[in-house]
Amino acid sequence: MSLEHTQKTYEKLGREDPFYAVLTDERFRHNRWDVPEFFATGEREVAEVFEYIRQTELVVPRGRALDFGCGVGRLTQALATRFDRVTGVDIAESMAAKARELNQHGGRVEYFANAVDNLRFLDDRSFDFVYSSITLQHVPPPSNVRYVEEFLRILRPGGVAVFQVPNGREIRDGSWQETFYKLRRQYFRRAWKIVRGKPPYEMHYIPRCVVERTIAANSARLVDTKSFGPSGRQNNFRYFVIKH
């Protein structure tokens, strides 16, 4: 699978309806989000995450943070109240441009567009905290796993990554299940959304066992997981990880 469709979808949404593209609540489609309330949702989410971190063994250095899948900066701006420097990365330049326009923290915050499945423009061991929410679920495999590897590459020892991605069963490369997965989640989902008049973004997952193997293989440790979304849902997780 390629990132080209994902990039084109979010470039278009970034130009036409950027807030809805980030939080796809039908009540606020066609630019009906109240901008202060939109950013307040980011503040509430980041506060919730850091309250949960406070209850674990994790201590997050407050130097530099990455918001991966930053959109227009909903979470980036909230992270900027907790870190000295924050970098936002999105697949669409239209999103990054809007985020720069709305930036409230001057040079302490920077935004980049990145449409490849690596973060090579960011140095090894250069971040204290990496955060990603409702982003990896729109990235097709194997790129979604490569991004997790990149999160761990850029973390400093003692740094913390918190990222969310749905869970699902592991599929063997080259199997008929892999072919079915691609047809259903790539082509069929896009077509069905277009028929219904919705943006044709894709929905993907990473099997929890693959996430755990990736963490262990990249000099990091899984500290905790937390169900993400409606109460009781067990197929979507936030992962809390520390780099050795």
Image (spheres, grey):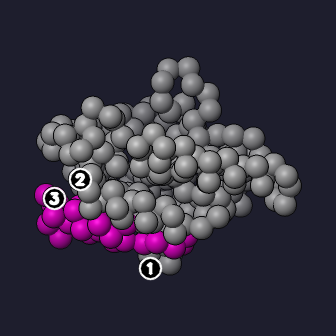
The answer to whether 46 appears left or right of 189 in the picture is left
Q: Residues within 10 Å of mark 2 (few under 14, many from 20)?
A: many
Q: Report the disc number at residue 77.
A: 2
> Is 242 included in the stretch rendered in magenta?
no
What residue lies at 29% left-to-right and 66% top-to-bottom? 94
CB within 8 Å, label 2 to label 1: no
Q: Quadrant of residue 52?
A: top left
Q: Report the disc number at residue 102.
A: 3
Q: Quadrant of residue 66?
A: bottom left
The answer to whether 231 appears left or right of 75 in the picture is right
Mark pair 3, 1: CA separation:
23 Å
Task: Of the two numbered discs 3 and 1 on the same chain, state the one appearing first in sequence.
Answer: 3
Mark 3 or 2: the one toward you: 3
What residue lies at 54% left-to-right and 43% top-to-bottom? 192
Helix, strand or loop at mark 2: helix
Provide residue 179's location: percent of width, then percent of height: 77, 55
Mark pair 2, 1: CA separation:
21 Å
What residue lies at 59% left-to-right and 41% top-to-bottom? 166
Is 171 placed above or below 38 here? below
Q: Report the disc number at residue 121.
A: 1
Helix, strand or loop at mark 3: helix
Mark pair 3, 2: CA separation:
9 Å
Q: Residue furthest front?
A: 195
Q: Tag 1: residue type?
A: Phe
Instruction: For the C terminus, give its image quadrant.
Output: bottom right
Q: Report the disc number at residue 238.
A: none
Provide residue 58's location: percent of width, then percent of height: 48, 44
Q: Which residues are magenta?
A: 92-118
Q: Tag 2: residue type?
A: Gln
Provide residue 145's location: percent of width, then percent of height: 63, 59
Residue 152 visible in the displayed image? no
